[in-house]
């Protein structure tokens, strides 16, 4: 009797706790994408820090109920428990700005030689293959990942005598194996993997699916078991495995195939049952159809799996947003309150452990993996359906713009108009914006080339012709052997002529990229410098009529680092007859770049001190022939987790002082999370090279040398602007987006003496790729602002501030 009363008191305490939690959930506002990603990263960071000691956080049943697997032995890194964590961590790596998550996963795979666990047929030992196959689909990582072991195992299974037997006899196997098999089909294009996966899936489905409740029994022995209330017993987490597994599987199923309808219908049927079974506190009972009295505590692994699946279903059009969004946000609210101040997700039920042995102090790898997947997918959901406003206190000079940094000039001032070339990351349109500086308003934005393709390399370069008209030149990033160009009216920059094109003739498949328009007045020539598709080297064509016609295709700089390398060059109009060029040996992904500089005049290459290097008539300049300004690591070797070669330079800005002395701004890659800004300036006698700021993390993993970039004031190159996501003086992670900073930097300054001033703060989006232009008494600082994920996926406006106006 005493024990019964004690149980009654305990139950009421737990119900009171849940009632208080429910009140908190009901009062929570719509989560912001910023909040969601930060808490998801916090949980991931805690997990990575405690990965080696996870055994101490594992829930165990009482001794009399323990099975052999209920222990605190360390999991193998290839076990299914770990694989579930990796699945969620990979989802996070796809949306987070931090490269450490995908680097951590790379190290796991490499350390274990890309193997599977030992059990031949067991689906649980196939689960880690999902990670390898996900990494393999990354363009820059595909040569690191070795799929030989996965392919050999799966081929052997299909060719074995037991191939047609039921191997996935527990429903959680539908998370472990099918996504790996489908992903192997996607990578190899071999439909046998997809066919075998579907055949095995149907065996499990036909054995364990309950068509009345639209849920899965955990295994055949549970088919006749019931809850204390008489309902059938469906374990929540086991159905979570299936539901989340479908969200991972369906994207790799061919569209309009015989399989697609089956898996999508199954997903929607399960979602309908989950919708009806959600508890008032936002979670699901450990037994989905059980009463709250039987399962008074929340259980976060199943709730995370369901939240992930529901968010994915709405994001991909399988679930109705109006119906399922309240369910999703209630689930997320329940999960948030289960995370402690350090970032540990609690209330995770142990492996086949007593449902009553669950508390805020216990967690598991698979629970955290499920949470990371949920947070990542909800982050996508919020960005899709509740995008942050791009309104800003700064001036919006052009909407839907975008640019790379190897085409110039991108912005010019003429006739009191700010003329901006851009490339839409949404439509792929080549766009031109005109802003009236005198009256402080946008004139309009026009399209120069509709639907070229979303790619910031396709942005146009601009040039003011002597009659006041504007020349624009652009190309499709290495896809065509064509330069497109057009010329405006000289009185109205919204009126343009017919689009023209120059077609290059050479024997190679790759096209041209990067337009840069500079003049030599004495020669009467306009130069268009570009990267050639023939050899990926800097080349040029010229015009003697200010861009009406083009010719004289010429190889300009030749790489002399072994292999198919591409020197990256930036250009500077030093004076009317001289063009300054700073460049690197190659792409920093391929080589530890040095930085070089020369000046080009009268068809001849010169050092900055005026000494002759060679004439162009003797052939292109070899990349090592010019003066070396900075010595990189000079190697192709790089650690596994470094996407670029450490100690690699990349030029990003140029300017000149009143004496026409060049200033070169460049970045230095140390690792994916640590870049530095540097300046090399010529004082008339020598180069002065110094580090000026921490540039922060790469913008995204695939292009790990991409930073927020920097710009000089063209009238005073000691006035510098940078974009970084860390404290520019210390490198401290500010846990926010890239912001714009400015500083006055003299020749004797270094990173310890420079005082950076933040021009933007606490921005909801990145502020990147600043430019400063000056003419006619106006000086304008511009940069890109908005969602920016990679060079072909962005939605940014061109914003900034007018620094000076005519007196």
Image (cartoon, helix red, strand yellow):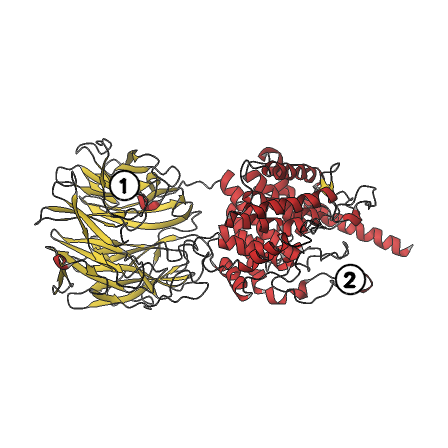
In the image, is residue 332 above or below residue 610?
above
Disc ID at residue 420: 1
Disc ID at residue 532: none
In terms of sequence position, does the residue under pointer 2 or pointer 1 come before the other? 2
- Camera-side residue of 403 and 297: 403
Q: Which is in the foreground here, disc 2 or disc 1?
A: 2
The quarter of the picture where residue 725 lies is: bottom left
How dense is the environment of label 2, judged by Cα within 10 Å: few (below 14), some, or many (20 and up)? Answer: few
Residue furthest to the left in view is 522
Residue 106: x and y in percent read 51, 61
Q: Is residue 117 left or right of residue 92?
A: right
Residue 468: x and y in percent read 15, 37
Residue 474: x and y in percent read 27, 42
- Camera-side residue of 226 and 764: 226
Q: Is residue 604 visible?
A: yes
Disc ID at residue 67: 2
């Amino acid at each position: 009797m005493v024990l019964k009363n004690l149980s009654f008191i305990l139950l009421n305490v737990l119900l009171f706790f849940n009632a208080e939690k429910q009140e908190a959930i009901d009062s929570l506002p719509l989560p912001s994408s910023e909040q969601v990603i930060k808490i998801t990263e916090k949980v991931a960071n805690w997990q990575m820090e405690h990965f080696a000691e996870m055994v101490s956080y594992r829930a165990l049943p009482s001794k009399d109920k323990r099975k052999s697997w209920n222990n605190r032995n360390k999991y193998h890194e290839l076990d299914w428990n770990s694989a579930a964590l990796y699945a969620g961590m990979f989802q996070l790596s796809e949306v987070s700005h931090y490269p450490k998550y995908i680097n951590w996963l790379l190290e796991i795979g490499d350390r274990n030689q890309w193997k599977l666990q030992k059990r031949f047929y067991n689906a649980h030992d196939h689960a880690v293959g999902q990670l390898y196959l996900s990494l393999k689909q990354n363009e820059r990582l595909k040569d690191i990942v070795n799929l030989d072991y996965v392919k050999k195992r799966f081929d052997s299974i299909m060719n074995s005598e037991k191939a047609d037997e039921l191997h996935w006899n527990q429903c959680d196997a539908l998370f472990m194996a099918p996504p790996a098999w489908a992903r192997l089909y996607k990578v190899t294009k071999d439909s046998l993997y997809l066919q075998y996966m579907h055949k095995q899936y149907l065996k499990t489905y036909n054995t364990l699916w309950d068509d009345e409740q639209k849920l899965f029994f955990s295994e055949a022995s549970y088919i006749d078991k019931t809850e204390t209330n008489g309902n059938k017993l469906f374990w929540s987490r086991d159905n979570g495995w299936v539901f989340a597994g479908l969200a991972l599987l369906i994207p790799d199923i061919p569209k309009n195939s015989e399989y697609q309808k089956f898996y999508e219908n199954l997903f929607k049927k399960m979602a309908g049952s989950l919708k009806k079974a959600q508890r008032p506190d936002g979670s699901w009972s450990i037994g989905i159809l059980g009463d709250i009295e039987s399962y008074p505590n929340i259980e976060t692994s199943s709730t995370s799996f369901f939240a992930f699946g529901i968010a994915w279903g709405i994001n991909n059009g399988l679930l109705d947003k109006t119906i399922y969004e309240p369910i999703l946000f209630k689930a997320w609210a329940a999960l948030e309150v289960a995370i402690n101040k350090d970032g540990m997700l609690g209330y995770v039920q142990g492996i086949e452990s007593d449902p009553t042995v669950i508390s805020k102090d216990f967690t598991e790898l698979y629970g955290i993996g499920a949470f990371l997947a949920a947070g990542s997918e909800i982050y996508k959901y919020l960005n899709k359906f509740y995008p942050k406003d791009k309104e800003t206190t700064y001036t919006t000079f052009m909407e839907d713009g975008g640019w790379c940094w190897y085409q110039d000039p991108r912005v010019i001032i003429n006739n009191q108009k700010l003329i901006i070339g851009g490339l839409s990351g949404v439509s792929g349109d080549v766009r031109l914006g005109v802003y009236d500086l005198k009256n402080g308003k946008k004139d309009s934005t026009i399209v120069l080339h509709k639907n070229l393709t979303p790619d910031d390399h396709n942005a146009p370069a601009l040039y003011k012709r002597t009659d006041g008209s504007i020349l624009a030149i652009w190309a499709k990033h290495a896809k065509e052997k064509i330069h497109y160009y057009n010329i405006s009216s000289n009185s109205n920059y919204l009126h343009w002529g017919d689009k023209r094109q120059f077609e290059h003739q050479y024997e190679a498949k790759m096209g041209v990229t990067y337009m840069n328009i500079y003049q030599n007045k004495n020669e009467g020539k306009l130069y268009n410098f570009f990267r050639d598709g023939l050899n990926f080297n800097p080349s040029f064509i010229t015009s003697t009529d200010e861009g009406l016609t083009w010719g004289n295709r010429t190889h300009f700089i030749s790489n002399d680092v072994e292999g198919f390398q591409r020197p990256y060059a930036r250009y500077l109009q030093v004076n009317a007859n001289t063009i300054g060029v700073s460049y690197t040996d190659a792409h920093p992904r391929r080589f530890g770049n040095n930085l070089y500089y020369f000046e080009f005049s009268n068809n001849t290459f010169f050092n900055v001190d005026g000494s002759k290097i060679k004439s162009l008539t003797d052939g292109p300049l070899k990349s090592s022939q010019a003066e070396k300004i900075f010595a990189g690591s000079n190697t192709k070797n790089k650690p596994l987790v470094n996407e670029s070669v450490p100690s690699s330079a990349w030029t990003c800005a140029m300017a000149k002082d009143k004496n026409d002395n060049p200033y070169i701004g460049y970045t230095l890659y140390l690792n994916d999370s640590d870049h530095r800004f540097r300046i090399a300036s010529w004082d008339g006698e020598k180069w002065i090279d110094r580090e000026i700021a921490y540039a922060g993390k790469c913008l995204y993993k695939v292009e790990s040398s991409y930073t927020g970039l920097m710009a000089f004031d063209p009238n005073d190159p000691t006035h510098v602007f940078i974009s970084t996501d860390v404290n520019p003086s210390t490198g401290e992670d500010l846990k926010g987006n890239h912001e714009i900073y400015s500083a006055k930097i003299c020749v004797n300054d270094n990173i310890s003496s420079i005082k950076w001033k933040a021009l933007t703060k606490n921005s909801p989006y990145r502020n990147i790729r600043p430019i400063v232009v000056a003419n006619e008494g106006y000086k304008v600082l511009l940069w890109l602002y908005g969602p920016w994920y990679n060079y072909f996926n962005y939605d940014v406006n061109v914003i900034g501030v007018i620094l000076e106006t005519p007196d």
